[in-house]
Image (cartoon, grey):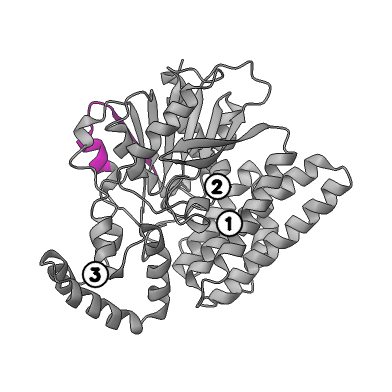
Amino acid sequence: MALGSTLHHTHGPFSDGFFHNPDFDYDLRVVLGHAFSGAADTGEVLAAVESVGERDHEAWFAAWLGLGSRIRAEADDQAAAGHDVSASRSYLRAAAYLGAALNAVASLPSSDALLPTFQAHRAAWDRFVDTTPVSIHRVSIPYEGMSLPGYFFRPWGAAGSGRTLIMNNGSDGPISSLWASGGAGALQRGYNVLMFDGPGQQSMLFEHGVPFRHDWEAVITPVVEYLLGRDDVHRDKLAIYGISQAGYWVPRALAFEHRIAAAIVDPGVVDVSTSWTSHLPKSMMKLLAAGEKERFDRDMELALKFSPDLARTWSFRARPYKTDGYYDTIKAVLNYRLDNVASSIATPLLITAPEDEQFWPGQSSRLAELTPAVSTLVPFSADEGANFHCEPLARSLVDQRMFDWLDARLV
């Protein structure tokens, strides 16, 4: 999700929203969208949040933490009793709910709950990894003198076509969200799947303090090298999927890394900074353009004193950039743009274009305009129940369209 998220219900479905609070409403849509892949159960989700007040951030966090903790405890009991299938499914749901709790920390007065909530989420996910009948191996991807943690999935009962999908998460998505965002669908279609934490993401940020970087080719090239060193990966059948802010990172990497056969971005992002700067008044943008760092930081600090919620959101969103002050954060984010490198992208690229995109409106079409020889723009509409950022309530439809396109290119 991007800074200052707002969900404008200009179209259906559910035009009034589940919550009038746009952040609660969008986060709930995301979790409900996990249900088709088994990473959520609609009834228990709605029951958990039905009594949460519109601005009660502590109750919102507590609802997700309580639900995730309860399902995790039930999973432990199921595993102890030898009910492996039930335990695996429960661990997956627990990981998803604890991932929602992790995102909810952004609006709490203190970030003290951040690390323990992340660790609880990742522990539930790891128990899913240990109990699921899917073949999953924890892997370490060499990266600049350290390693990136990941998970390599083998498809159910497949002889091994070697088709492999790299799943690149967004700015703050828990790794469990990738299961519902194409991971389960890829396995069902016979793909290997690699999920990993990159710089600034999840364990790399919360446990190791490694920040984001705009030159994401420095991340994807080591990932490609790792995969091509495996004998169960076909070097000519390598694909990549990028969700949310990875709609920038993946095309950026493709401009320099040309060994990937096909790519999907959900949605396309040409300029990450607009999700930050669109909320700034013209006077602040003039200070930014003029390099008035001290005045910019002073005015931002004053403005955020009157909006504690926005101040907490800023702090959470700025954390992965590891910058000092408001000015330096915006200047760093301004480097996250594709218009100067997009002409070098030669990889076939599917770009989702959801109606009512609230974080980077119009940028999917702009990316397609910058890459006309290789891009396929696929609209998703409110009439299909597939509007808003990353089509949260239509993940089965997204799977169908992106894998039908991908299958035709990795024959």
In what element is the residue under mark 1? Answer: helix
Q: Secondary structure at mark 2?
A: loop
Which quarter of the rendering shows the N terminus? Answer: bottom left
Any mark on residue 175, and which? 2
Farthest residue, direction right: 81
Region of the chain picked out in magenta, as a range: 365-380
Q: Label 1 vs label 3: CA separation?
A: 30 Å
Residue at 79% across, 44% down: 86
Q: Amino acid at mark 3?
A: Leu
- Can residue 105 be seen at all in this image of the molecule? yes
Q: Are marks 1 and 2 in contact (CB under 8 Å)?
A: yes
Q: Which residue is tagged 1?
A: 99
Residue 303 at x, y percent in the picture: 29, 81
Marked residue nearer the N-terminal end (2 or 3): 2
Res 273 seen here:
no
- Name which residue lies at 49% across and 42% down: 148
304 or 294: nearer the eye? Answer: 294
Local SS, label 3: loop
User: Is residue 256 part of the magenta span, yes or no?
Assistant: no
- Residue picked out by circle 3: 280
> At which x and y percent is residue 383?
44, 47
Q: Is residue 257 above or below residue 149?
A: above
Instruction: Please provide percent x and percent y for residue 15.
Output: 45, 61
Q: Is residue 370 magenta?
A: yes
Q: Residue at x 35, y 58 (%)?
A: 321
Q: Quadrant of residue 333?
A: bottom left
Q: Residues within 10 Å of mark 2 (few under 14, many from 20)?
A: many
Q: Nearer the viewer, mark 2 or mark 3?
A: 2
Amino acid carrying label 2: it is Ile
